[in-house]
Image (tube, rainbow, N blue to C red):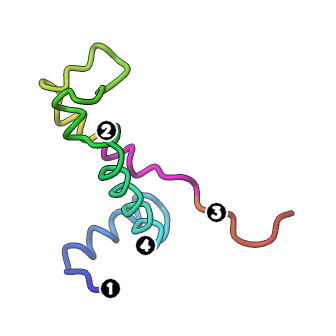
Amino acid sequence: MYLRPAEKECLDRLTARLETTKSDVLRRGLEALERQISDPDHHPALRIIGIVSVADDPEVDAARDHDDVLADCEIASWRGPPPPHEGKPG
């Protein structure tokens, strides 16, 4: 797969920040994108315009705090399931 220099730098930064492999970053990115497309509860734009609940906290004002809401949604999307255990148990 070809990545432009800026995309490669982004992948390198995410790999370092998440302390994982490039493959894991790409897998998690694909999972997050699929969730956003298929599940409106995880789509940041729908949450902001009020079609879907933004937060459990009634103090959150998505219109006023839209940057924070989007950032929180994006960061939450990075937290995928833990990678499967490789190797033999025990």
**Disc 2 and disc 3: Cα gap in Å?**
25 Å
Q: Which residue is mark 3?
A: 84
CB contact under 8 Å: marks 2 and 3: no
Majority SS type along the magenta span:
helix
Q: Earlier in the sequence, mark 2 or mark 3?
A: 2
Q: Nearer the viewer, mark 3 or mark 4?
A: 3
Badge 1 density bin: few <14, some 14–19, many ≥20, Cα 10 Å = few
Circle 3: element type? loop
Q: Position of residue 41 (x, y in %)?
A: 34, 37
Q: Which residue is mark 2?
A: 72
Q: Quadrant of the N terminus?
A: bottom left
Where, by quadrant of the figure, is residue 10 drawn? bottom left
Circle 1: element type? loop
User: Please, what is the three-letter code of the amino acid marked with disc 2?
Assistant: Asp
Q: Position of residue 77 (x, y in %)?
A: 38, 48
**Disc 3 and disc 4: Cα gap in Å?**
16 Å
Q: Which residue is mark 4?
A: 22
The label on residue 1 is 1
User: Please, what is the three-letter code of the amino acid marked with disc 4?
Assistant: Lys
| Residue 27 magenta-highlighted | no
Position of 43 compared to 64: left or right? right
Identify which residue is drawn at 24% across, 33% down: 47
